[in-house]
Image (cartoon, coloured by chain):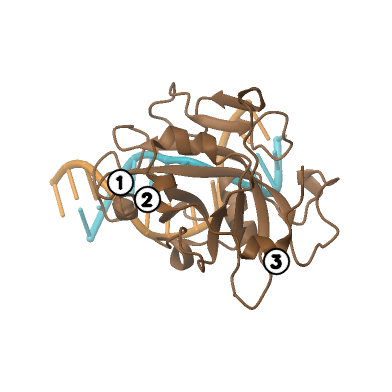
Chain colours: A brown, B cyan, C orange
Amino acid sequence: MHLPDIPRLLDTPPFDRAFFAQPTLQVARALLGQWLMIQHDSDHPPIVTRIVETEAYTQDDPACHAFKGPTPRAKSLFGPPGLAYVYLIYGMYHCLNVVTAPTGEGGAVLFRALEPVFHPQHPTGFETLKPAQSPLQTHGPGRLCKALGITKALHNELDMTHPQSPLRLLPSGNHLPDKAVMITTRIGISKATDYPWRFYVKDNRWVSVP
DNA sequence: GTCGCGATTTGCT
DNA sequence: GCAAATCGCGACA
């Protein structure tokens, strides 16, 4: 896996709104292997990660928060594609999604696991680290938000397509072949448990449930 | 106003 | 393997 050139990455345009307006399942699949970066302050270097596990949720899907329409919590899901949807689960963990349906329609991709690629305080990298001993715990939707400092108060409804957004999704230039992608049912839900809408990178040790 | 529960994680048995 | 932690949201009165 090639490491990104950080100064160049900071000048890379994020995926645009048209990318996130594609069908949700397609976006969930296409985001595997791409970069997710967070830059809390434009004066400081970002934390860069590689997306290794996602799940798709659509408006006509009983497991999706948009299923019952634009309720107060789900309002951001009906916003423009590329918006961040961050919500609190079990009273203590946040989960990060990107909205992937045209404005007025509800749908999103949930980020379930990221592979740490660059952190300014760990310039030696994460190549040889196992998730359990990593200073950045990014395997699991709640853990990755905690590790990157993502909260509903700070990041919900942020436009991730904006070039200066603190949260950005960037093309890595790598497209994963189908043989490197695993597809299973989604984790932790009680409705629509048979939908094969979870995507992850085969044999990647950062995946939440192999 | 009250009540049940969740797209999770952690710690203990 | 199982239960606790912890609180906003959504359903219903």
Q: In the image, what residue occupies the spot 47% across and 29% down?
A: A197
**Chain containing the residue with disc 2:** A
Q: Position of residue A27 (x, y in %)?
A: 47, 39
Q: Nearer the viewer, mark 3 or mark 1?
A: 3
Q: Earlier in the sequence, mark 2 or mark 1?
A: 2
Q: Please state the chain letter of the residue tagged with numbered disc 1 in the rendered image.
A: A
User: Which residue has dot 1 on it?
Assistant: A102
Q: Is residue A129 left or right of residue A25?
A: right
Q: Nearer the viewer, mark 2 or mark 3?
A: 3
Badge 2 vs badge 1, beta-carbon distance below 8 Å? yes
The 10 Å Cα crowd at callout 3, few under 14, some 14 to 19, many 20 or more, is few
Q: Amino acid at mark 2?
A: Pro
Choose top left, top right, bottom left or bottom right for residue A209. top right
Is residue A128 found left or right of A82 in the rendered image? Answer: right
Identify the image quadrant of residue A174.
top right
Q: How far apart are labels 3 and 1 at the CA level?
A: 32 Å
| Residue occupying image coordinates x 49% and y 37% | A28
Going from N to C along the chain, the mark reached first, 2 or 3, is 3
Is residue A143 shown above or below A163? Answer: above
Q: Nearer the viewer, residue A7 or B12?
A: A7
Q: Which mark is residue A7?
A: 3
* Residue that label 2 marks: A81
